[in-house]
C-alpha cells in the first residue's frame, strides 16, 4: 500500500492527505515523531532529509509541490493543458508568498507568547494576500482557481486555510481571528472556501484535531 510519511500535524502533509482522500486513494498515513524523523534522516531514508515523503511502488518522492503535481496528474487534479496547468501553479506559488516562517511560524508560538505586535504583523501580511486571491477568483469562469474544476492549487490553499484561518485548535485564537475577519468582505474567496469545505467535508470530519 502507498505510504505518506509526515509529522502528526497538518502543515505540508495536509494537502496531500486531502487530495488522496478526495480521490478515494487508499494509503498509509504514517505520522512520525521528532525522534523517528531524526532516525529516518540519519539512516538515509529521506531524500534531502525532508518530509513529507510519498512512497509508492518502490518509488520515493519528496517536496510537497512535486508530490501534489505527481498525484494531481495521476488522479485528475492537474491538467497538461498549459493554461490550466498555469492556473494550478499560480495558486501553489501564491501560497508560498505567505507560507513563510516569519508569518506562519507565529502559529507555533504558545498563546502567552503571541503579542499584539505579532497579531498585527501577521494580519497586515494576510490582508493584501487574501485580496489578491479574491481578485484572482473574480477573473475565473467557475468556483475554483482553475475555473470549473478543482486543481492542486485549490487543495493546497484550502489546506492552509484549514490549518490557520478556520482552524478551531490553533494555539492563539486571537491571532486566527484577526486574520479570519479579513475574509468577511471578500465574497469570491468566501464562496470558494464554502465550495471547498463541501468537497472536503468527509476528510475534515474524520481528521484528528491539530493546532497546525
Image: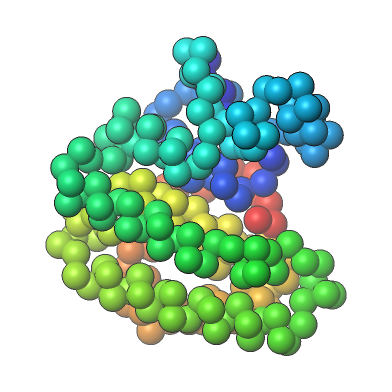
Residue 123 visible at all: yes
Quadrant the C terminus occupies: bottom right
At 52% from the left and 39% from the top, the residue drawn is 63
How many numbered badges does the structure rendering display? 0
Frontmost residue, 34 versus 63: 63
Task: Give x and y (percent) for residue 107.
Answer: 69, 65
Model colouring: rainbow
Splitting the image into 4 quarters, where does residue 128 fall? bottom left
At 25% from the left and 52% from the top, the residue drawn is 86
Q: Is residue 139 above or below residue 60?
A: below
- The reply, left or right, for residue 211 in relation to residue 139 is right
Task: Give x and y (percent) for residue 165.
Answer: 55, 68
- The reply, left or right, for residue 37 in relation to residue 102 is right
Frontmost residue, 25 versus 153: 153
Task: Give x and y (percent) for residue 187.
Answer: 32, 77
Residue 203 visible at all: no
Task: Give x and y (percent) for residue 90.
Answer: 32, 58
Q: Is residue 167 above or below residue 151?
A: below
Frontmost residue, 15 versus 38: 38
At 76% from the left and 21% from the top, the residue drawn is 43
Amino acid at each position: 500500500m502507498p505510504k505518506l510519511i509526515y509529522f502528526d500535524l497538518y502543515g505540508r502533509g495536509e494537502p496531500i492527505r486531502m487530495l488522496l482522500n478526495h480521490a478515494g486513494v487508499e494509503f498509509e498515513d504514517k505520522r512520525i515523531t521528532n525522534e523517528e524523523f531524526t532516525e529516518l534522516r540519519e539512516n538515509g531514508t529521506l531524500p534531502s532529509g525532508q518530509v513529507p515523503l510519498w512512497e509508492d511502488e518502490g518509488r520515493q518522492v519528496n517536496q510537497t509541490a512535486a508530490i501534489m503535481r505527481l498525484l494531481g496528474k495521476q488522479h485528475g487534479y492537474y491538467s497538461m493543458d498549459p493554461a490550466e496547468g498555469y492556473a494550478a501553479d499560480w495558486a501553489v506559488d501564491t501560497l508560498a508568498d505567505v507560507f513563510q516562517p516569519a508569518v506562519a511560524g507565529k502559529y507555533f508560538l504558545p498563546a502567552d507568547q503571541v503579542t499584539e505586535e505579532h497579531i498585527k504583523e501577521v494580519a497586515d501580511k494576510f490582508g493584501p494576500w487574501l485580496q489578491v486571491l479574491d481578485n484572482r477568483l473574480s477573473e475565473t469562469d467557475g468556483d475554483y482557481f482553475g475555473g470549473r474544476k478543482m486543481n492542486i492549487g485549490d487543495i493546497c490553499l484550502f489546506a492552509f486555510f484549514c490549518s490557520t484561518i478556520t482552524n478551531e485548535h490553533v494555539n492563539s485564537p486571537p491571532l486566527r481571528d484577526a486574520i479570519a475577519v479579513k475574509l468577511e468582505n471578500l465574497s469570491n474567496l468566501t464562496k470558494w472556501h464554502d465550495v471547498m469545505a463541501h468537497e472536503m467535508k468527509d476528510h475534515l470530519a474524520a481528521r484528528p484535531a491539530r493546532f497546525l
